[in-house]
Amino acid sequence: MPVLLDAFCGAGGCAVGYHRAGFRVIGVDIAPQPNFPFEFHQADAIEFIRAHGHEFDAISASPPCQSSSALTKGTNKGMVYPQLIPDTRAALAGVAVPTILENVAGAPIRKDLMLCGEMFGLGVLRHRFFEMENWSIEAPPHPKHRGRVRGWRHGRYFDGPYLAVCGEGGGKGGVTEWQQAMGIFHTAERKETAEAIPPAFTEYIGKHLLVFLEEGRQEVFSA
């Protein structure tokens, strides 16, 4: 079974998707992650990639998005967040395996792939972008959004088929609704769910990545 490193793993939204696709997943994060469902190492993710990246068949990295997120900039004015994407990209460049660098729309990464919850029938939109090296993938069709994101905006309530899985109040729903909307059930922590990537995103990526890795092995054996 191919082994994938989930760097900046958090509680494991990405990891669950890669596991469903068929990977053995190992996570690394600088903070304790008691709800991470697979093998976990508490360490600096960038240093871990530099030291151990060559031991994996593939690496997925999701550096903190706060420095690039419009939501954070709008609600936490005056806060300074570290921008870890350049150092993460440099660490990934030092390994000769397929890599995936994920972040939000405003992040300084190439938009090689965009995924949206509507592509997978989820109750969130949560557009996320992926920069890929040493391999490539095509996006699935992007269906038209079916309506608005539910909640209060500027004193007015809007109904809609999607939830805003972030923050508190504003008609955003409880954790159970968030779990259903995101397709995440291994954690019931509100903050962990809010910060996660829907596993459906990385299950899609992981299935294509497995095919790519298998085709590469076939080429080696037939050479």
Image (cartoon, helix red, strand yellow):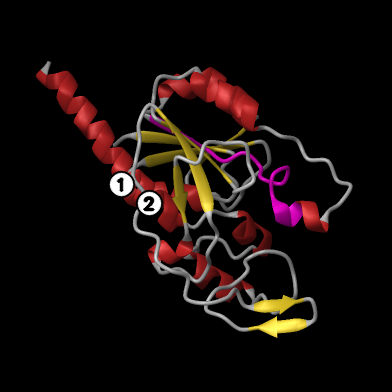
From the viewer's perspective, tell me whether residue 146 is left or right of residue 148: left
Judged from this view, the residue extending furthest toward the right is: 78
Query: If the image is split into quadrants, where does the N terminus sit?
Result: top left
- Considering depth in this image, is 48 or 197 the residue closer to the camera? 197
State the image coordinates of residue 47 (x, y, percent, origin top left).
Answer: 61, 23
Query: Range of the magenta residues?
Result: 58-72
State the image coordinates of residue 155 (x, y, percent, origin top left).
Answer: 80, 81
Q: Measured along the vertical axis of the image, is residue 7 above or below residue 221? A: below
Q: Under tag 1, what secondary structure?
A: helix
Residue beneath label 1, please? 207
Contact check, label 1 and label 2, Cβ < 8 Å: yes
The tag on residue 203 is: 2
Q: Amino acid at mark 1?
A: Lys
Give yes or no for residue 26 being in the magenta stretch: no
Label 2 neighbour load within 10 Å: few <14, some 14-19, many 20+:
many
* Rendering quarter of residue 159: bottom right
Query: If the image is split into quadrants, where does the C terminus sit?
Result: top left
Q: Under tag 2, what secondary structure?
A: helix
Q: Amino acid at mark 2?
A: Glu
Residue located 78% across and 40% down the image: 81
